[in-house]
Image (cartoon, grey):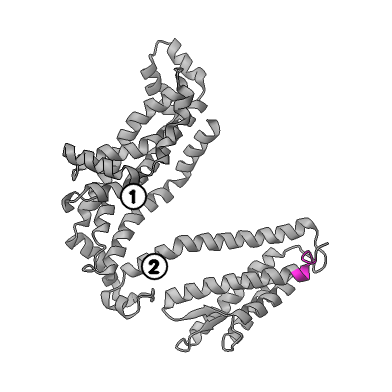
Amino acid sequence: MSLLRYGYVTGPILGVLWAFIMATTLAVLLSFTTGEAFRPGLWGCILLGALVGLAAPENRKGWLLTVGAAVLGVALSYTPFSPIHVAETVGMGGHLSAGIGFGIGLAWPVTVMMAGAPRGALNRHEWEEAVIRFLTGFGYIFFTAIVAIPFYVMVMTSLKTQGELIANPLDFSIDLSQGWGLFRSYSELFRDFNFGSYMWTSFYVSVLTVFITLAFSIPGAYAVARLKFRGQKALSRSILLIYMVPMIVLALPIYIVFSMTGLRNSILGIVMIYPVTTIPVALYMLQGYFRGLPGEVEEAGLMDGLNRLQVIWKITLPLSLPALASVSLYVFMIAWNEFLLAFMLLDDPSKFTLTRGIASLNSSEIPRQHLMAGAVIATVPVMALFLGLEKFMTRGLTAGSVKG
């Protein structure tokens, strides 16, 4: 048996690795929230990680190990062997937060990872289970960090003044004593930069895109899924081929055609071009769902005297509401977040969509916090929409993929 498959070897290795993960995570978190300097410590992570990992197998009192690790974390924070080095300007509160947070974040997860594992030889199941728990915890932290950190930086930057950003651009803490003054950048965007108009334009353009997309994709997807005609399989397989051509390649031809026809710098042009990017994906999603619907129900409708359009309207669409809702949400988010076409075709600020309006803030003459505030305004509504309807959207998409 490999030497790694012993609790007194696997535990310390996983403990040291987890110690570095927790030290890095906590150092970044404390630095962002306090504006002070925190950084991981090499020898402290190795020392505490190995000790906790060695004690974790067959541990019956995880709370005692956690308390001990927290006490050691605080004590070592004043020494060169600190797992998280604290700046000299930070007081006792910073040392306590770093030490206790590190101790809890290290001991409790490592105890869970090594739960049920003996100190001696591990069988394959016990060893793999410990490693999988470690990788699962790392995955949660890693993917949460890459999503949350940019959003946190964006929000915190939008709540600062120009003077605070110039004084320390890396300080992402905020002064809560300012009260509603923290949101000055948002009020200035709506008052001075016409962001209310940008949001309204993006909203109704996105809604129109949804309706136009459904109007073309529903009959198209139904035809591919239900009707028999020459080239049906080839058409079904080639629906998404348009996405093999990058939009940047089509940018110049679109710009020339729209300029020649007078559609450039108009909302009509935007409403015409957006569905071109959304109809293929809507067709692909809906035709898979339509294939999964029971054909006998539609045949019964035809036998009762309904024509094909009536069957679609009275039978197919009511049965497809989850898929239609999913496609509508997906198309809305695509249209709401679209930037390249809006940036290329719109020059008049009175016709800007939200993404085009945010791009206009990227100027040396406009404070950086206004750009970040605009990004928050564009992100939060669609994020709230997605999170609020995520289960419904996922259910519709999954049903279509499984049945199709």
Q: Residue at x 63, y 60 (%)?
A: 135
Q: What element carries label 1?
A: helix
Q: In this view, does 246 lie to the left or right of 343?
A: right
- Which span of residues is magenta-colored? 3-9
Query: What type is the residue that disc 2 sits on?
Result: Val
Res. 269 mark: none
Work out whether mark 2 precedes mark 1 in sequence or the reverse, and give the earlier one: 2
Q: Is mark 2 on a helix, strand or loop?
A: helix
Q: Are marks 2 and 1 in contact (CB under 8 Å)?
A: no
- Residue 138 shows in the view: yes
Q: Where is 200 relative to 194, above or below?
A: above
Q: In this view, does 201 lie to the left or right of 116?
A: left
Q: In this view, does 311 lie to the left or right of 144?
A: left
Percent x, y of residue 111: 69, 68
Q: Residue at x 22, y 56 (%)?
A: 195
Percent x, y of residue 365: 21, 68
Which of the 4 image quadrants contains residue 101?
bottom right
Q: In this view, does 49 lie to the left or right of 2?
A: left
Q: Mark 1 points at which residue?
A: 337
Percent x, y of residue 199: 25, 51
- Residue 58 shows in the view: no
The quarter of the picture where the N terminus appears is bottom right
Percent x, y of residue 275: 32, 37
Q: Where is 296 relative to 388, above or below?
A: above
Foreground residue among 340 and 151: 340
Label 1 neighbour load within 10 Å: few <14, some 14-19, many 20+: some
Label 2 neighbour load within 10 Å: few <14, some 14-19, many 20+: some
Q: Distance between the residues labelled 2 and 1?
A: 20 Å
Q: Residue at x 22, y 67 (%)?
A: 366
Query: What type is the residue that disc 1 sits on?
Result: Asn
Q: Which residue is drawn at 29% across and 68% down?
A: 369
Res. 153 mark: 2
